[in-house]
């Protein structure tokens, strides 16, 4: 599974750095390196709903440093099971 | 003579506790020639500043208009106000006059001899002496070659450290040795001037005993950077623009997420980005095959503006750091003489969102500030709005 996190200007200001670090840490903790590839992306085209995150070819979702834990536990984990 | 660019940079530090500098540098760029005058007024402070300013203005204006050297010197001597204490009207000066075909004329009056370097060695040239009312004026004329460097200094450079950490100060020969080493390391006039002035400042223990000025001139091959930022107003022209952009001969820089995506898409490739933040406040750089530098937009640009401004103010900046803003700054300061800005006019919806910090919506003014700073550094700039 490929998870793309936007690091464009708007997303950066809204917390890409924290989200990337949180996800990196979680993936390492739960030993999911083989299953999840994290990738930075320059502008996913949804600047007004930063921070933009996209799983594979799914629609771009908006995640914030406050909601990233929830996002990881639900959306990412659910996508892994499928 | 092959195509060339006359790269010029000059910097001063004032004598300790002085607000005004008694050294003045004036550069005039005309279509057919470039003139630089460095004058060092007698004494320090206001009086020295007036003497050197007048000398520079008279010399540059008269020579620009094609007056003879003799006439120019005569005018300077008869115009400068006489110092009541010393009963002298006096300012030393060096005039460098480089015509477009590379012919260089140097006129020196009581200043430390101009350093001329070719292939990291001093060029010792025969000087013609002209006597003007008991005073000697030296004339040198030679054909410049690509890579030749001239360094003009006020005597504050030669005397750096005198009576302080060095008994006799730094002498002309030592400065020459220093320049031979530095010219191996740096290719921009800005870096050479900065390096020499920094060295003087250290010798003076940051309390200069005299106004200290360095002017550096290098005959460089022109180097161009093409910088694209912001998507074009009309996306129908993207493909044409990208084709034109990648065919430009210079180094290519793209600043901005959308701009990067446009370039990548039209080159049938993708933007590769790294997850590794080198510093939390600047987004990582990206990579597109065929493009020399790909960065995020407004945040990287504003950080670069800050870096270049601090650099201008003689602060120490590590230009070798690898983050996007420093790479961009180094490229613009060091590695080019000409810059083409390709600025898109499309509006990013995120920049209009009142919830976002105002730093986002000021991209255009940041670009304008960057352009102004680079012009102050002597870069030749063309702006294309697309």
Image (spheres, rainbow, N blue to C red):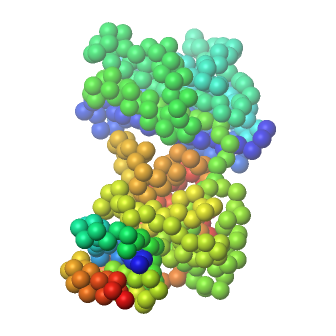
Q: Position of residue B90 (x, y in %)?
A: 46, 23
Q: Residue at x 65, y 30 (%)?
A: B148
Q: Does any portion of residue B44 appear in the rendered image?
A: no
Q: Residue at x 38, y 27 (%)?
A: B199
Q: Residue at x 54, y 75 (%)?
A: B261
Q: Is residue B336 left or right of residue A28?
A: right
Q: Residue at x 65, y 19 (%)?
A: B123
Position of residue B129 relative to residue B242, above or below, is: above
Occupied quadrant, residue B204:
top left
Occupied quadrant, residue B6:
top right
The front one of B373 and B178 is B178
Q: How many marks?
A: 0
Q: Is residue B104 left or right of residue B22?
A: right
Residue farthest along the top direction in this orientation: B167
Q: Position of residue B297 (x, y in %)?
A: 45, 69
Q: Position of residue B23 (x, y in %)?
A: 43, 32
The front one of B194 and B110 is B194
Position of residue B361 relative to residue B124, above or below, is: below
The front one of B134 and B30 is B30
Position of residue B219 relative to residue B152, above or below, is: below
Location of the N terminus of chain A by quadrant is bottom left
Residue farthest along the right direction in this orientation: B1
Occupied quadrant, residue B134:
top right
Location of the C terminus of chain A by quadrant is bottom left
Q: Is residue B241 left or right of residue B296?
A: right
Q: Does any portion of residue B19 appear in the rendered image?
A: yes
Q: Position of residue B264 (x, y in %)?
A: 59, 72
The front one of B23 and A77 is A77
């Amino acid at each position: 599974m490929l998870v793309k996190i936007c690091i464009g200007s708007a997303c950066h200001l809204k917390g890409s750095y924290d989200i990337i670090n949180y996800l990196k840490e979680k993936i390492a903790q739960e030993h999911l390196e083989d299953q999840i590839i994290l990738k930075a992306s320059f502008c996913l085209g949804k600047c007004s709903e930063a921070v933009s995150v996209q799983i594979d070819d799914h629609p771009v979702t908006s995640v914030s440093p406050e909601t990233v834990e929830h996002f990881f536990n639900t959306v990412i984990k659910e996508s892994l099971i499928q | 003579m092959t195509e060339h660019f006359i790269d010029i940079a000059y910097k001063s530090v004032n004598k300790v506790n002085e607000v005004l500098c008694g050294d003045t540098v004036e550069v005039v760029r005309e279509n057919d020639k470039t003139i630089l005058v460095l004058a060092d007024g007698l004494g320090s402070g206001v009086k020295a500043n007036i003497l050197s300013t007048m000398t520079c203005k008279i010399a540059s204006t008269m020579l620009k208009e094609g007056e003879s050297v003799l006439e120019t010197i005569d005018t300077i001597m008869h115009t400068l106000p006489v110092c009541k204490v010393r009963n002298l009207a006096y300012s030393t000066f060096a005039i460098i006059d480089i015509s477009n075909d590379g012919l260089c004329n140097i006129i020196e009056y009581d200043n430390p001899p101009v350093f001329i370097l070719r292939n990291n060695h001093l060029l010792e040239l025969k000087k013609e002496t002209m006597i003007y009312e008991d005073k000697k004026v030296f004339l040198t004329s030679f054909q410049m070659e690509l890579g030749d460097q001239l360094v003009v200094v006020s005597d504050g450079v030669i005397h750096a450290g005198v009576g302080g950490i060095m008994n006799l100060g730094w002498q002309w020969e030592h400065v020459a040795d220093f320049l031979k080493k530095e010219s191996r390391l740096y290719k921009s006039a800005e870096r050479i001037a900065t390096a020499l002035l920094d060295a003087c400042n250290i010798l003076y223990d940051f309390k200069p005993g005299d106004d200290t000025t360095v002017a550096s001139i290098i005959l460089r091959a022109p180097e161009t950077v093409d910088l694209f930022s912001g998507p074009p107003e009309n996306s129908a022209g993207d493909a044409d623009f990208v084709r034109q952009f990648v065919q430009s001969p210079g180094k290519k820089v793209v600043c901005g997420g959308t701009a990067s995506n446009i370039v990548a898409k039209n080159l049938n490739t993708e933007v590769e980005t790294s997850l590794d933040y080198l510093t939390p406040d600047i987004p990582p750089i990206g990579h597109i095959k065929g493009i020399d530098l790909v960065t995020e937009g407004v945040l990287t640009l504003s950080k670069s503006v800050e870096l270049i401004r601090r650099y201008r103010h003689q602060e120490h900046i590590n230009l070798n750091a690898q983050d996007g803003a420093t790479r961009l700054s180094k490229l613009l300061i060091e590695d080019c003489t000409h810059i083409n800005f390709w600025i898109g006019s499309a509006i990013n919806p995120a920049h209009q969102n009142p919830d976002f910090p105002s730093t986002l919506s000021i991209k255009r003014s940041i670009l304008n500030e960057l352009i102004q700073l680079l012009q102050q550094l002597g870069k030749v700039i063309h702006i294309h709005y697309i």
